[in-house]
């Protein structure tokens, strides 16, 4: 199977706040990342670390402040013609956290799916072929076409509607699906089922999902490769084993914060949530304000990215000089 990739090069998004725009939030900070076809990439990080901002830039919904995004070496934000943009969306689709916000509430869900068939003009003009195509796609996400007949979004559960959203994203047979918190708003009992759909998509349909979320265990469960984000920067990147035995102090802290069942009654366990002012950024390590291993150099200079074999970490602890 041909290899495809999405490359993020020094990708940055800065939001200006206040009337004069003097306060700035660096939501995504010089991110360099290669997303490859054939794998499930998990992007993990706590609230406010820039996950949605990154997803929206990849999906051409939010223009980067600087840096570039390439899909198979094509500059995604350099696309001008609608036909080229459409070709990009044929290959790179998105799924969002709230399935109800992703569908027109006044349109029947099947009609929304028929609308998306415009990506496939050869089939779209033939109603019976379209119906069979949709039936097959809905089956692949565990739904039956008949059960959606005449239904509006509010008549489906969050889990069902998220499956429909996945089906809709699958219609053009994309190479990548960028899914921003696809299970955080669905019932806990159906989360694994939906994550299993993404695994099936990779294995059976050759679609490569990028699953963005804040849940440590789910990221471990679903991903072939993990990227840990903190305050807009990738702090650790590697195989899912990095979550078993993390190297970066922030990933370690995330791991300790996972509320395991056997910790339920322990008074010692406190989730490690620390408020910080997102508009304030020092010149050194972005994690220095919380890091138990902080050294003087951490406040003075940005840490280098160090390769540890199975992972890469952005931390002075592993730098040789
Ligand atoms: N439109 C905006 N204007 C100003 N600041 C914004 C805007 N969108 C996001 N931000 C800020 O950028 C940072 C990253 O936000 P983002 O929504 O990307 O985080 P996230 O990781 O998706 O968080 P969550 O897990 O809560 O969804 C946050 O500090 C957020 O407040
Ligand atoms: S560079 Fe320093 S402050 Fe930052 S994570 Fe590493 S040890 Fe902690
Ligand atoms: Mg988000």
Image (cartoon, helix red, strand yellow):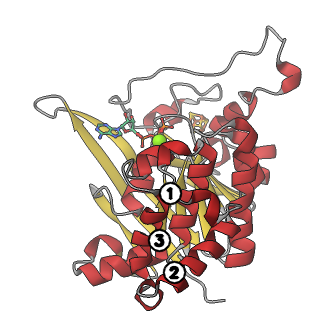
In the picture of the structure, the residue carrying the numbered disc 2 is: 130
Question: Sequence order check: which comes first, mark 1 or mark 3?
Answer: 3
Q: Is residue 246 left or right of residue 209?
A: right
Residue 244 in which image quadrant: top right
Whether residue 193 appears in this view of the structure is: yes
Q: Is residue 271 left or right of residue 59?
A: right
Q: Specify the quarter for ligand 1.
A: top left
Q: Find numbered disc 1 in the image and state the secondary structure of the residue it sits on.
A: loop
Give the quarter of the figure containing the N terminus.
Answer: bottom right
Q: Nearer the viewer, residue 15 or 157?
A: 157
In the picture of the structure, the residue carrying the numbered disc 1 is: 150
In the picture of the structure, the residue carrying the numbered disc 3 is: 92
* Vertical position of residue 18 compared to residue 129: above or below: above
Whether residue 321 appears in this view of the structure is: no
Residue 134 in which image quadrant: bottom right
Q: Residue furthest top?
A: 267
Residue 146 is situated, as x and y percent measured from the top left of the image, at 63, 63
Residue 160 is situated, as x and y percent measured from the top left of the image, at 62, 50
Is the C-beta of the residue carrying label 2 under 8 Å from the nearest atom of ligand 3? no
Q: Nearer the viewer, residue 196 or 161?
A: 161
What residue is at 79 percent from the left and 52 percent from the top? Answer: 241
Question: Sequence order check: which comes first, mark 3 or mark 2?
Answer: 3
Q: Residues within 10 Å of mark 2 (few under 14, many from 20)?
A: some
Residue 99 is situated, as x and y percent measured from the top left of the image, at 50, 47
Residue 87 is situated, as x and y percent measured from the top left of the image, at 38, 81
């Amino acid at each position: 199977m041909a290899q495809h990739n999405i490359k993020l090069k020094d990708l940055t998004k800065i939001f200006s706040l206040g009337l004069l725009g003097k306060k700035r939030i660096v939501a995504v900070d010089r991110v360099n990342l290669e997303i490859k076809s054939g794998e499930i990439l998990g992007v993990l990080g706590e609230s406010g670390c820039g996950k949605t901002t990154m997803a929206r830039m990849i999906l051409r919904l939010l223009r980067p402040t600087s840096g570039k995004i390439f899909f198979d070496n094509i500059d995604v934000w350099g696309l001008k013609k609608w036909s080229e943009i459409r070709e990009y969306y044929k290959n790179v689709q998105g799924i969002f956290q709230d399935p109800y916000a992703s569908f027109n509430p006044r349109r029947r869900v099947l009609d929304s799916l028929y609308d998306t068939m415009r990506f496939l003009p050869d089939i779209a003009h033939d109603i019976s072929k379209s119906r069979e195509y949709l039936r097959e796609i809905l089956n692949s996400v565990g739904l039956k076409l008949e059960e959606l007949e005449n239904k509006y979004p509010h008549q489906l559960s969050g889990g069902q509607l998220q499956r429909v959203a996945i089906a809709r994203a699958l219609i053009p047979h994309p190479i990548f699906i960028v899914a921003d918190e696809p299970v955080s708003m669905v019932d806990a009992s159906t989360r694994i089922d939906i994550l299993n759909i993404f695994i099936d998509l990779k294995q059976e349909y050759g679609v490569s999902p990028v699953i963005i979320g804040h849940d440590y265990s789910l990221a471990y469960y679903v991903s072939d490769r993990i990227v840990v984000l903190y305050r807009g920067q990738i702090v650790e990147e590697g195989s899912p084993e990095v979550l078993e035995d993390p190297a970066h102090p922030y990933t370690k802290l995330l791991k300790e914060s996972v509320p395991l069942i056997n910790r339920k009654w322990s008074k010692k366990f406190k989730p490690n949530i620390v408020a910080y002012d997102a508009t304030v950024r020092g010149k050194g390590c972005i994690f220095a304000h919380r890091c138990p291993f902080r050294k003087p150099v951490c406040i003075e200079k940005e840490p280098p990215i160090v390769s540890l074999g199975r992972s890469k970490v952005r931390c002075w602890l592993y730098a040789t000089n």
